[in-house]
Image (cartoon, rainbow, N blue to C red):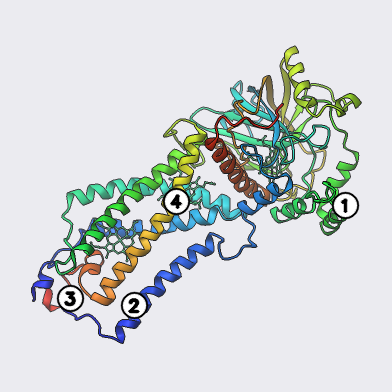
Amino acid sequence: MSRQPPRPPRAIFRLAAIGLVIAILATAFAYVSGWLDPGWLTPDSLIDTLEADTGIHAGYRRNHAKGICVTGEFESNGQAAALSRASVFDPGRRVPVIGRLAIPGPDPNASDAMPPVRSFALLFRLPDNEQWRTAMNAMPVFSVSTPEAFREQLEASQPDPQTGKPDPDKLAAFFQAHPETKPFLAWAKTARRSSSYANIGYNSLNAFRFIDDDGNTHFVRWGVEPEAPFSPMTEAQKQDPDFLSQELRQRLADGPQRWHLIITVAEPGDPTDDATLAWPAERRRIDAGIVTVDSAQSQVDGPCRDINYDPLILPDGIEGSDDPILSARSAAYSESFNRRTREQAEAPNRHQEPQS
Amino acid sequence: MNERHASRHGQDFSIPARLLHWAMAVMIIAMLFIGAGMVATVSERHALLISIHKPLGIAILLLAIVRLGVRWRYPTPELPRHLPAWQRLAARLSHWLLYALMLAMPLIGWAMVSAAGYPVTLAPGITLPPLVPTSVTLYAALRFAHTWLALTLFALILLHLAAALYHAWMLRDDVFASMTSGTRRRGPGSE
Ligand code: HEM
Ligand code: HEM
Ligand code: HEM
């Protein structure tokens, strides 16, 4: 109270102590923000790596950039209700869905004939402001099990400025260094490209937890299986860079397309943190209901444009697993969404690049 | 006792104000670190931190409203009169700015998540209604504001902390004690 202010030189030390406290806090903040170590794998640096492929395509997703919006509904048959208390699985529950069918890769002008994979993302709009979002790929396993390896794969597949194609030596070196890619490579060797978005199945690949009414946890993966029979991409289709969206519109003109939502239930010991490993084929599969798609819209102004299919946006009754890819996807999709919505806001009427 | 100290004699922040100040100081500083950390990592910390960030932010919003009520209900001590006028003005302005930001940050967070079309999930099964309709234009603006106002808030807190320590360690007046143990119990000169 009636103490006198300190005299120099003690004042110097006291001032320095104040400065030190502030400097420590500021440095800690810079540290957690990743500003002190440029090598940190951040959502930013992952998205930069994706952009390095074919440059920035303003307004577009930084991966799976080319696609088409679809809408329809999901009707639950109640079979999954014993495993998850999520309202989407109530018997007879019907909820609207907004989906997106796409091909992987950061280039919105890519040819549909190129990639072996197609993708299907779905947003189920549930009662009480809840949502279930999922982004699935048409493949049985993912190539890598960690975000670090994913970035290495992206870097190894970047087009060589000279040839415009990935450097085969770099790719070979990457796969050599990552034996976890073997199941994926084995599949990729024999995979047949489909003639349609509507005649293949899509998988969540990452595992999730279903929580039932009693609070018990069941590890699951899910996917959708088409009613339409598979047929391979034709020679004529290979010449048409936009055949997938055109074929889909034709199909939908003839009638709605259906997929069954299949839940695969893990047994103790099945890997739940590694999307490169398939579960044994005899695992219990539950047909939970039907996804019906009845119309398609351009992704330039359709309802899927402004949706981030973040795989961790889940309703009560579904939770993420311990798979490290899930958190990385959530973080990276958000950064991709931040960039493309900012571009969208800056130039809402930008005439986007050619579109399907 | 001399006049310098009389101005502050017996004037402390009320106990509820002090409790709220320190509880919220910890929460708000934690929020800034959680926010900055979660957008800078792709590890499992990202999902964990974001699941803390949203409910903690809404808790700060509720406490900030209670705190304004407490401030209105109980008297607030004046700063010592010997301080230069500009310092007292700076203190007053910065305190109001801190109040404004502790309300604005969670409101912007809630509105931003709503504008993105995300459900505003605080915990499994606990979802707030959207504060604004879905709009990417709005989202882009709010997302920008959330980052830059957070940095402003952090800078202001550093200044605030430096000023508080300056009072405690250099000027050694009652300002710091008025927010901690209180000035009344301090030394013979105060009674
Ligand atoms: C660390 C690994 C991964 C990274 C960094 C990553 C990155 C991305 C990014 C940045 C987008 C664009 C998001 C947007 O702007 O909305 C995207 C879309 C997508 N990703 Fe991934 N991804 C990863 C793993 C996976 C896996 C394992 C799957 C398989 C299920 C997957 C399936 C999809 C699908 C289907 C889309 C398109 C969603 C849509 O149509 O909007 N991704 N990915
Ligand atoms: C980090 C350590 C902190 C210290 C040492 C500290 C210290 C103090 C002190 C000594 C006062 C009293 C000033 C006076 O007599 O007028 C005060 C007031 C105040 N502090 Fe802090 N503070 C800290 C953090 C924070 C944080 C994080 C916030 C909020 C963002 C905050 C918001 C306020 C506000 C709004 C007042 C003014 C109260 C009023 O006049 O109603 N403080 N602080
Ligand atoms: C006192 C309140 C709050 C503070 C101090 C705060 C602070 C922060 C900070 C520092 C960031 C990182 C920004 C960046 O570096 O770009 C952030 C991000 C974020 N905040 Fe908050 N926040 C608050 C409240 C909220 C609330 C209430 C919500 C939602 C209900 C929220 C949702 C978010 C989200 C979703 C992100 C990350 C968005 C992304 O992935 O791009 N925040 N916040």
Residue B87 in the image, given as x and y percentages of width and height = 23, 64
Q: Name the residue tied to disc 3.
A: A1
Residue A164 versus residue B19: which sits nearer the camera? A164
Residue B11 versus residue A84: which sits nearer the camera? B11
B43 w.r.t. A191: above or below? below
Q: Earlier in the sequence, mark 3 or mark 1?
A: 3
Indicate the chain on which mark 4 is placed.
Answer: B
Q: Name the residue tied to disc 4.
A: B148
Q: Secondary structure at mark 3?
A: loop
For image coordinates 80% across by 33% down, the residue present is A111
The kind of residue on which mark 3 rests is Met
- Measured Cα–Cα span from mark 2 to mark 4: 29 Å
Answer with left or right where residue B177 lies relative to residue A108.
left
- Measured Cα–Cα span from mark 3 to mark 1: 76 Å
- Measured Cα–Cα span from mark 3 to mark 4: 39 Å
The kind of residue on which mark 4 rests is Trp
